[in-house]
Amino acid sequence: MSHTTFPSIDPAAHLARVRERSPLIHNITNLVAMNTMANVLLAIGASPAMVHAREEAAEFTAIADALTINIGTVSPHWVEAMIEAAEAARLVGKPWVLDPVAVGATAYRRETGAHLLERLPTVIRGNASEIIALEAGGAGGRGVDSSDPAEAAEQAAVRLARRTGGVVAVTGEVDLVTDGRRLARVHGGHALMPRVTTLGCSLTGVVAAFVAGAEDTFAATVAALACYAAAGGIAGETARGPGSFAVAFLDALHALEGETLGPRLQLEMTDAT
Amino acid sequence: MSHTTFPSIDPAAHLARVRERSPLIHNITNLVAMNTMANVLLAIGASPAMVHAREEAAEFTAIADALTINIGTVSPHWVEAMIEAAEAARLVGKPWVLDPVAVGATAYRRETGAHLLERLPTVIRGNASEIIALEAGGAGGRGVDSSDPAEAAEQAAVRLARRTGGVVAVTGEVDLVTDGRRLARVHGGHALMPRVTTLGCSLTGVVAAFVAGAEDTFAATVAALACYAAAGGIAGETARGPGSFAVAFLDALHALEGETLGPRLQLEMTDAT
Amino acid sequence: MSHTTFPSIDPAAHLARVRERSPLIHNITNLVAMNTMANVLLAIGASPAMVHAREEAAEFTAIADALTINIGTVSPHWVEAMIEAAEAARLVGKPWVLDPVAVGATAYRRETGAHLLERLPTVIRGNASEIIALEAGGAGGRGVDSSDPAEAAEQAAVRLARRTGGVVAVTGEVDLVTDGRRLARVHGGHALMPRVTTLGCSLTGVVAAFVAGAEDTFAATVAALACYAAAGGIAGETARGPGSFAVAFLDALHALEGETLGPRLQLEMTDAT
C-alpha cells in the first residue's frame, strides 16, 4: 500500500469552482443541523435551501444542483419526502448525498436507511459506526457519536461503494474516502470538531456542493473533506473552546483559498483492497 | 424624485418604545430561522415565542402583540396554523408580517403565498425575487437568495402595497419600503449580512416588534430596517467573516441606542409613483 | 432558616462523573433549542441525541441514560412520542426531566403539561411562572419569559415535589431546588443569560446529564445548576453582549473544572417548609 500524495486531486480548484458556480443545494436534513448547515454552505460559497414537505420536495430537487438527505431526526412524512426526492434526483441525474445519522440505533432508522440505500446515493458520508451499521443492514452504535475509529469501517466502506456504485466517506480523526477502487485518507481537522454539534451533518452539504457538476465524484468528495479539515485546523489555532471554535470555523471556511489551503493538505492515496 | 432625509421618522424613538414595551412576538417561522430569530428579537428588546401547532396558534396570536408568518419550510399542518393565526390576527386587530420565503420556487409555495396574501398582511418583507413573484402570483427565483436587486421590485412593491392596503419592504443591498403612497430607501448594512443564514427572516420579527402598537406602520417598518442596517454596519467593523459577524451583530443590536444609531442612519424619502 | 453552605453537595465531583461517563441524553425538545442544547450538552461532556418520532422515541429512551421532554413547540405527533418516551423511562427506570415551557399560555399546553405530570418526572425544571402554572394546573404567564421571580414559586415548587415524589428546580436570578424536604438556592449566573434564547431549555439537558446514574437526584440537580451558574459568571466577564456571551458560555462550560468552579459556588441550603 503506497502512501504518496495523490497528484491529481486539487482541492483549491474544486473550491474555486464551488465559489464560481454557487450551486443550489437542496437539503432534507435534521432539525438540529439546519441553521449550522446553512451557514456552513453559505461560508463555502454555495446557496442552501431546506425543503422537506412532500408537497414540494421532489419538485425542488429538480431545480437544485444537488440534494442531501440526513436521517438525524426522521419522522414518517419526512421519510416519504426523502424517498421521493432521492428518486427525483436519480431521474433527473442530480447527485445526492446520504447522511445515515445513528442508522444502527433503532429499527426505524435501519429501515429508513435501507430504503434510502436502494435509491443508490451518489455519496454516503457518515462516521465509522454508521457506515458499519448501514453496510451490515443491522444494529450498531448508540447515538450520533461514533464509537469506532474511521479505520474500523474501511472494509464496510469499500463493500458499500462497490454495491452502490457510489462514493463512501467515513469521517473521524482521519477521514477515509473510497469509490470501491481508489481509497484516500484525509488528515487534519481539530479535536474540537466533534465537540460542536452538526459539523458532520454540515460537511454532508459541503460534499454535495463540491460534487455538484464535478466530473469525478471521488475527487470532489476528497476535495470537500480536505477543505473542511483545513478550515478546522485554521479555526483550532485561535479557538478557546467549542463556542469560539464554531465561530472561527465559519470565518475560516469563508476565507479559505488556495494559498491558505495548500500547506495544510494532507492526503494519502492508495488502491482499495 | 427628491433625496432628502425624511424628518418625521425617528428610528431611535421607535427603538426606545420597543425596549420599553418588550412586545410579545408570535412567530410561525421556518425551522432554520427559529434560534437566530429568537436571539435577534431578544437582542432588540422584544419577547419572542415560536408557536405553530394548529391546536394553539390562533389562541396564542390573541395574547401576543404581533404575529409573523414565514413560509421558509412549510408543510400542510403548519400552513393550516398559519392561516388560522393570520385570521385571528385580523379579527383581534393585531399586526401581522408575512415573509414569503422562496415563494416563486414551487407550486406549493405559490399557493401558500396566495392564501396568506388574501389575509391581508400588515407588512410584507421579502427580497426582490420574492416580492416580484408574490405580486405576480407566479414563478420566479430558485431558492432563498434573491437573484434581483431590491430596486427591480419597486413597482411590484408599490402595487402589492396598494392592493393589500399594507406596507411592503424589499430588502437587499439598499432596502425599499412603501405603503403605496410613500417610498423610503434605507442604506447601510454590510456585505456579510446575506452570508449569515436567516438574518432576513429575523428582520421580519424585528419589523413586527416595531410595528406592534405603532401609530404609523410605514414609519415603524422604516425604523426597524434602519436599526437593523445600523447594527449590521457596526458589526461589520470588527467581523473577520460570517461567523464573527453573526456574533457581533447580536452584540450590536443589543447595544444599539440613539447615540450610536444617529450618525449611521441613511434614509431617503420620496413619493411612490 | 439557616443560610449555611451545604457541605455534602460537591458540584465538581458531579461534573467529573458526567465527563467520565459521557451519558447519552435523549431529548424531545423544542425546535428553537435543539442546536444550542446539543452544543451545551457536548460542552459539559455528555452525548446528546434528539429523537422525537413516535416510531422510535420509546425504543431510544431504553438505550439512553436519561430523557428530557420540553413542550416549547409541541404538536400532536410529538406529544404522543413524549408520553410514550416518558412511560418507557419509568418502565426501565431511566430518569427523565420535564421542561414545561410556557405551560400556562394555552389550553393545549396546560393539557399536555398535565398528561406529562401524570408520568411523574424525576425532575421538573422551569421558570417561576411555569412552575406556578404547572402546579396549579391552570393559566399564568404569557410566553416563555417568566413574569415572576423564582422566589414567588417556592411554595408551588415544594408542593409539586411532594406530589410527584421528584425534584423541582425553579430557575431565575436566584435558582431554587427542592425535593419537598430540602431546599437549595443557587446564586450566580449573569444578567445576559435570559437574553440568549434556550439557555434555560439547554440547562434541562445538563440536569439530565448530572442526574443520570446519580445516587441523589436533588444533589445532582443542585450541582448541575451550580455548574451552569458558574459558567455563566465566567462568560459574563468577557462578553460584550448576548452574541459573545453565548460563545463564551460554551467555552466556559467546556473548560469548567474543580479549580475554576470552587470559588464561584454560592449555595444555600435549608429545610423546605
Image (tube, coloured by chain):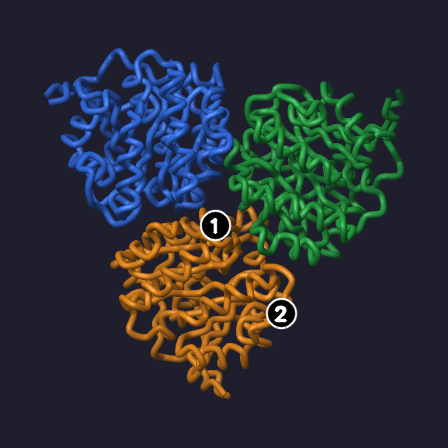
Chain colours: A green, B orange, C blue
Q: Is residue C243 visible?
A: yes
Residue C115: x, y in percent? 29, 34
Which residue is the site of mark 2? B139
x, y percentage for residue A56? 60, 56
Q: Earlier in the sequence, mark 1 or mark 2?
A: 2
Of B29 and C52, which appears nearest the observer?
A: C52
**Amino acid at pointer 2:** Ala
Instruction: Specify the quadrant that holds the C terminus of chain C.
Output: top left
Where residue C186 appears, as percent x and y from the top left, is: 25, 27
Residue that appears at 82% across and 39% down: A219
Tag 1 residue: B248
Q: Nearer the viewer, residue C58 or B144?
A: C58
Q: Secondary structure at mark 1?
A: helix
Q: Is residue C26 left or right of residue A212?
A: left
Residue A16, visible in the rendered structure: no
Q: Quadrant of residue C79?
A: top left
| Residue depicted at x 52% and y 39% | A32
**Res. B20 image quadrant:** bottom left
> Left or right: where does residue B57 sit relative to residue A80?
left
**Vertical position of residue C48 compared to residue C195: above or below:** above
Question: Label 1 is found on which chain of the structure?
Answer: B
Tag 1: amino acid: Ala
Residue A272 in the image: above or below residue B111:
above
Chain letter of mark 2 equals B
* Quadrant where the N terminus of chain C is found in the figure: top left
Q: Residue at x 48, y 87 (%)?
A: B2
**Numbered disc 2: secondary structure:** loop
